[in-house]
Image (cartoon, rainbow, N blue to C red):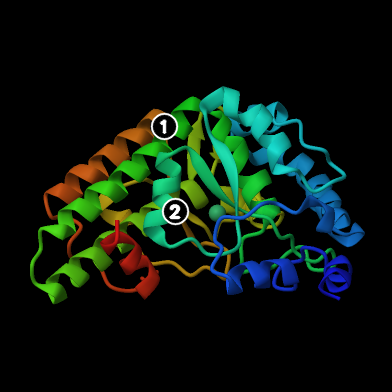
Amino acid sequence: MAQLTDSISGLTTTQAPFIEEAQAHGQLYIQQPYGLYNDENHEAWRRLFARMQDRWQKYANEHFLKGIECLCLDPNKVPKLSDVNEFLCPLTGFQAKAVSGYVPAFLFFDCLRNREFPTTITIRRSDRLDYLPEPDIFHDIAGHVPMHTDPAFADTLVRFGDCAHTAADLVKSISDEGERTHVLASIIRAMARFFWFTIEFGLMNSKDGMKVYGSGLLSSYGEIAHCIESPLVQRFPIQLEWVINQGFEIDKYQPLLFYVDSFDHLFSLVDELEKWMKAGKLDNVAPGEPLVSEADLASFLRA
Ligand SMILES: [Fe+2]
């Protein structure tokens, strides 16, 4: 019966019995049960992939364009993670790793440190391609993974993982529980904001003009054009003190974006972030979004 339900609903976002079962059993890291994708799932991938082609050529940065070619993705089928990894791993050591849902902050960053990228395996409905609050395999594989083929970008993600370990070690030395929670929540918020305004929504000022490297933009048909073309979007050179104190809303086009000059520039900013963390400069960042969950806090305290 469960198999019958699976074959009808496939691996559609929020409608996949396979994922519900994995979550119910506390299984975060899972296999990709490729046979469960139904025709509608493949059709969703086909449509999403086809409509991005021209927009990627126009707006994406050159590292992404090179990366997505290296991965040899099938335009008509949801990708198999094992196939993706065969092309990806020899380039930077990175691998896509299937997960059943939200990965608490420390575990997420720790995966990056190990050159593993927690990857959603479900896909949005084929009749709702545009708005999706949750990540799906199109966002993760077509938006994030091509960037992981670039050595400088990959090294930057690993440095994020180092920062998470530094944070976990730092807060261990705070004996007062209330103070420890306050500092840790502030550091996680700072890291999440930095990640959001770079890895998810970053722009790069290149020799060809302003280009997109953030995966939230690279996987959005509407926003990849809006973020470059719209006079309503404010684009500023990135400043660490601004980014770590800047809140954001996830369910609308971003009105404020930051650009870097290169991935070496981005890497140096993550170094700086760690220095600031050690100096206590992340202990009291501005309150607000994103909210830090109990699971995020616990993941650092258990590290
Ligand atoms: Fe993402």
Kind of residue indicated by mark 2: Phe
Q: In which quarter of the image is residue 7?
A: bottom right
- Of the residues under marks 1 and 2, which one precedes in the sequence? 2
Question: Which residue is denoted by mark 2 in the rendering?
Answer: 108
Disc 1 to disc 2: CB gap under 8 Å: no
Image position of 266 (left or right of 185): right
Separation of disc 1 and disc 2 at Cα?
A: 16 Å
Task: Sort mark 2 into few (<14), some (14-19) or many (20+) by Cα contacts within 10 Å.
Answer: some
Helix, strand or loop at mark 1: helix
Question: Which residue is denoted by mark 1 in the rendering?
Answer: 155
User: For the point 52% across and 68% down, which residue is it?
Assistant: 250
Task: Sort mark 1 into few (<14), some (14-19) or many (20+) by Cα contacts within 10 Å.
Answer: many
Q: Vertical placement of 183 versus 49: above or below? A: below
Q: Looking at the picture, how far across and down is residue 157, in whole percent?
A: 42, 40
User: For the point 8% across and 67% down, which residue is it?
Assistant: 175
* Foreground residue among 195 and 160: 160
In the image, farthest residue toward the left: 175
* Foreground residue among 141 and 298: 298
Image position of 163 (left or right of 252): left
Image quarter where the N terminus lies is bottom right
Judge whether residue 285 can be spotted in this image.
no
**Which dot marks residue 177?**
none
User: For the point 57% across and 30% down, which residue is it?
Assistant: 149
Helix, strand or loop at mark 2: helix
Q: In which quarter of the image is residue 22?
A: bottom right
Q: Vertical placement of 149 versus 194: above or below? A: above
Image quarter where the C terminus lies is bottom left
Image position of 92 (left or right of 169): right
Image label count: 2
